[in-house]
Amino acid sequence: MQQHLRDPSLSVDAIARALNCSRRHLYNAFAGEGESIAGYIQRLRLQACVRDLQQGGPHARPITDIALSWGFGNPSHFSRVFRDHMGKSPTEFRGS
C-alpha cells in the first residue's frame, strides 16, 4: 500500500488483485485493527500531506497540488477530511 499511496486508484479491489487474495480476506485481516482499509489508506495519505504542508517557505507547493499528489482526487473532499483529522483547514494548518 505504501508504494502506491500516491495512486488515486488505490482501493481494496486493487490491493486484493495485487496480493492475489479476496476482498473478504483483506477485510478480515483488518477486522481487529479498529480501522478499515480505506480509513488506513486515508490516514496514511493525510499524514503525508501534513508532512508536505509543514514544508513552508517561498517554494512551498500549493495545497491542491499536495492533495492531488497524494491521491486525493477532489480538493474539497481533501479539505473536509483534513479538517476532521487535524481540527483545522489545510490553510490554517500551514499558517500556524
Image: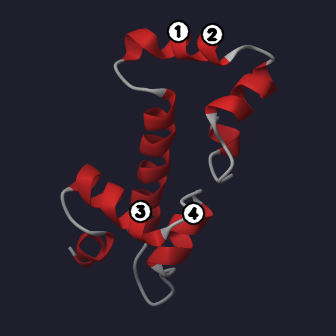
Q: Secondary structure at mark 1?
A: helix
Q: Earlier in the sequence, mark 3 or mark 1?
A: 1
Give how far across and how far down residue 87 sits, in percent. Answer: 18, 57
Please state which of residues 70 and 96 is positioned toward the viewer in this rendering: 70
Cα gap from disc 3 to disc 1, whole angstroms? 28 Å
Q: Please tell me whether residue 55 is drawn above or below residue 1 in the rendered image.
A: below
Residue depicted at x 55% and y 75%:
65
Cα gap from disc 1 to disc 2, whole angstroms? 5 Å
Residue depicted at x 44% and y 26%:
36
Please identify the residue farthest to the bottom as the structure is shown.
58
Cα gap from disc 2 to disc 4, whole angstroms? 27 Å
Residue named by callout 3: 77
Q: Pointers 1 and 4 in contact (CB under 8 A)?
A: no
Q: Please tell me whether residue 57 is drawn above or below residue 52 in the rendered image.
A: below
Residue named by callout 2: 25
Residue named by callout 4: 73
Q: Secondary structure at mark 2?
A: helix
Give how far across and how far down residue 4 sits, in percent. Answer: 69, 44
Give the amino acid type for the residue marked by disc 2 in the picture: His
Give the amino acid type for the residue marked by disc 3 in the picture: His
Cα gap from disc 1 to disc 4, whole angstroms? 27 Å
Please state which of residues 74 and 71 is positioned toward the viewer in this rendering: 74
Q: Earlier in the sequence, mark 2 or mark 4?
A: 2
Quarter that holds the C terminus? bottom left
Give the amino acid type for the residue marked by disc 1 in the picture: Asn
Q: Secondary structure at mark 4?
A: loop
Give how far across and how far down residue 69 sits, in percent. Answer: 61, 65
Q: Which mark is residue 28?
A: 1
Q: Please tell me whether residue 12 is drawn above or below residue 50 in the rendered image.
A: above
Q: Quadrant of residue 23?
A: top right
